[in-house]
Amino acid sequence: MMDRCAQITDEENEKYINDIEKNGCEIYKLSKKERAAFEPLAETVWKEYVDNGRISKEELEEMLSVLGKKVDW
């Protein structure tokens, strides 16, 4: 189910990105190096969300599994 949801989200995002660009906006796409720099910071936010009860650790793990990622805490 999560894989199908991710696929739908990717398709929708691509459509919206194309619409935004067609209307004259420039979209900056991060390089792999730039994107990698965000990963440790994102994990801090994920942990804060779990610690504050916004999502459960199980929900986070399910979402991350779609990306092939895991948390170590």
Image (cartoon, rainbow, N blue to C red):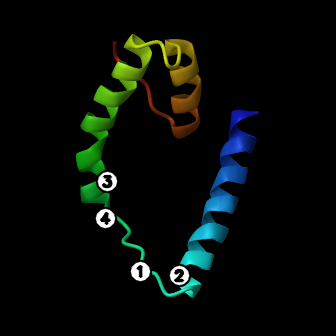
Q: Could you tell me the amino acid type at mark 4?
A: Ser
| Mark carried by residue 31 | 4
**Callout in the foreground (2, 3):** 2
- Residue contact at pointers 4 and 3, CB within 8 angstroms: yes
Q: Where in the figure is residue 28, as x and y percent of width and height?
A: 36, 72
Residue position marked by numbered label 3 in the rendering: 35
| Mark carried by residue 21 | 2
Question: What residue appears at the point 75 percent right and 43 percent down from the top-left corner?
Answer: 4
Quadrant containing the N terminus in the rendered view = top right
The CA distance from mark 1 to mark 3 is 18 Å
Question: What residue appears at the point 31 percent right and 59 percent down from the top-left corner?
Answer: 32
Question: Mark 3: which secondary structure?
Answer: helix
Q: Could you tell me the amino acid type at mark 2?
A: Glu
Judge left or right: residue 73 versus residue 54. Answer: left
- Residue contact at pointers 1 and 2, CB within 8 angstroms: yes
Mark 3: give few (<14), some (14-19) or many (20+) Cα within 10 Å: few
| Picture quadrant of residue 52 | top left
Question: What residue appears at the point 47 percent right and 12 percent down from the top-left corner?
Answer: 53
| Picture quadrant of residue 14 | bottom right
Sooner in the amino-acid sequence: mark 4 or mark 2: 2
The CA distance from mark 2 to mark 3 is 21 Å
Sooner in the amino-acid sequence: mark 1 or mark 3: 1
Q: Could you tell me the amino acid type at mark 1?
A: Glu
Question: Mark 4: which secondary structure?
Answer: loop
Q: Where in the figure is residue 34, as x and y percent of width and height?
A: 25, 57
Q: Where in the figure is residue 43, as x and y percent of width and height?
A: 33, 30
- Residue contact at pointers 1 and 4, CB within 8 angstroms: no
**Callout in the foreground (4, 2):** 2
Sooner in the amino-acid sequence: mark 1 or mark 4: 1
